[in-house]
Image: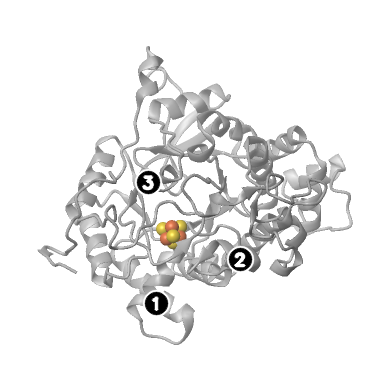
Amino acid sequence: MPASIRDELDILDQAVLSDVVVGELRLSPKQALRLYHEMSIHQLGRWADARSRHMHGDHIRTYVIDRNINYTNICTARCTFCAFRRDGDEDDAYTLQYDQLLAKIQGLVDIGGTQILMQGGMNSDLPLAWYLDLLREIKERFPQVHVHAFSPPEFLEFVRFFDPPGDGLEKKMRWVMQQMKLAGLDSVPGGGGEIFAPAVRRKIGLGKCDAHEWLTTMRVAHELGMNTSATMMFGHIEGIADRIHHLELIRHWQDRSIADFAPDGGGRYKAFIAWPFQRENTPLGRCKEWGRGVGDDPGRPFPGDVVARLDGSGEKDQDPLFGRRVRLAGSSEYLRTQALSRLYLDNIYSIGSSWVTMGPHIGQVALNYGANDMGSVMMEENVVSAAGTTYCLNEAMICRLIRDAGFIPAQRDNEYNLLKVHADADSPDVRVDDWSRFRTQQLDGQQPDAPPVALTVGAGERAF
Ligand code: SF4
């Protein structure tokens, strides 16, 4: 049973927050908004850390060794925050062949990796058989590798492109997802969450699934026994109340999944990760930062805050500059938002640090602001790096960051089972005697000037 919500209590009262920390009280949306605006970042971080320690103990903080594989950058959507997508006829558009994908997984296995995160653009040229054969091939060659793949926007496009049997989205989605699961899909990543409020979503996610579709996709995954993650990308046009509305929807639907499916072995949101919008090379990034546009009045609230409502009902007409100014979020706003998410999402096990966008050191500080997990060693990244952010950590560096933050690093799997606890002299970071050479690590990405590749279905070659 979820803890109760007592909206009338003063959330700045230490005794009330102590009950939140031990899971006996749940934040209401209004209380969360008040915490965000009125509590100092240091205090908010301390309370989030206390909640994290209550859930995960004082000693171990985790990471996973996986590889981000972006199988195609061809995409029919035009999200304004995206620097990764290409039209099919652009010079640097690509779709990976099976042997390229399998070679990447072999590279992961060679360094002790356990999981792939495989996502791509919404590419209408790829038939269902391309995905199913790929999943079967991966499972045949690498049965030990967990396949965490295809976020809700991709699944929505699968339903649109493949026209599966069934009436309505839920049935069609179930059919597609069952095929994928039978072929080897293990869990579903939470990409494309962005911000759920319709007014924001309509402005930034052209051609992409709405909140209802995103949440329905995840509910079907949970029903079929697969875990998923949830995400939020903030610091663009949204208001703070929109972030809380986003957290509320995730918490609500997590309650429903646990109540409806857990008794029969169903899945749930296992982790939440939030990161700030990265503006480089994106259409949305060309919007003026609030306060720097012609006619901006710094005495007025940010347009997103004028429009945002805690129930998601904001309308764009409430401010003429809504969608035309971005807030941008730096380190303190990132840490504040993450801390609030740890306190709000009492039914989600893991909060991940976003060092990929914030850099290793803020990512490390995030471990004291409610995060319990450093996410993945980064062998390859193509999406955030397209927007100008290219941090890279190997296993030794990630272990050192966790240890320097006061914790024992441990490698985990996708289910958060501990695989190796690095408490001794044989730990990856303790073995390093010269850290200077670690400064030159480069991301292994899909090279933009790589020659176009023919698509492969199963064992035979087929051109599309
Ligand atoms: S964010 Fe994803 S869905 Fe949106 S344009 Fe980029 S690749 Fe396509």
First along the sequence among labels 1 and 3: 1
Say which amino acid is labelled 2: Trp
Residue beneath label 3, please? 382
Residue beneath label 2, please? 253
Quarter where residue 314 is shown:
bottom right
For this view, does 401 lie left or right of residue 104?
Answer: right
Residue 366 against residue 194 in the figure, above or below: above
Task: Say if disc 3 is inside 8 Å of ligand 1.
Answer: no
Task: Say if disc 1 is inside 8 Å of ligand 1.
Answer: no
- Residue at point 60%, 30% (across, down): 365
Q: Residues within 10 Å of mark 3 (few under 14, many from 20)?
A: many
Q: Which mark is residue 160?
A: 1
Residue found at the far top of this picture: 433
Q: Residues within 10 Å of mark 2 (few under 14, many from 20)?
A: some
Q: CA distance from mark 2 to mark 1?
A: 24 Å
Q: Considering the image in quadrants, where does the C terminus appear? A: bottom left
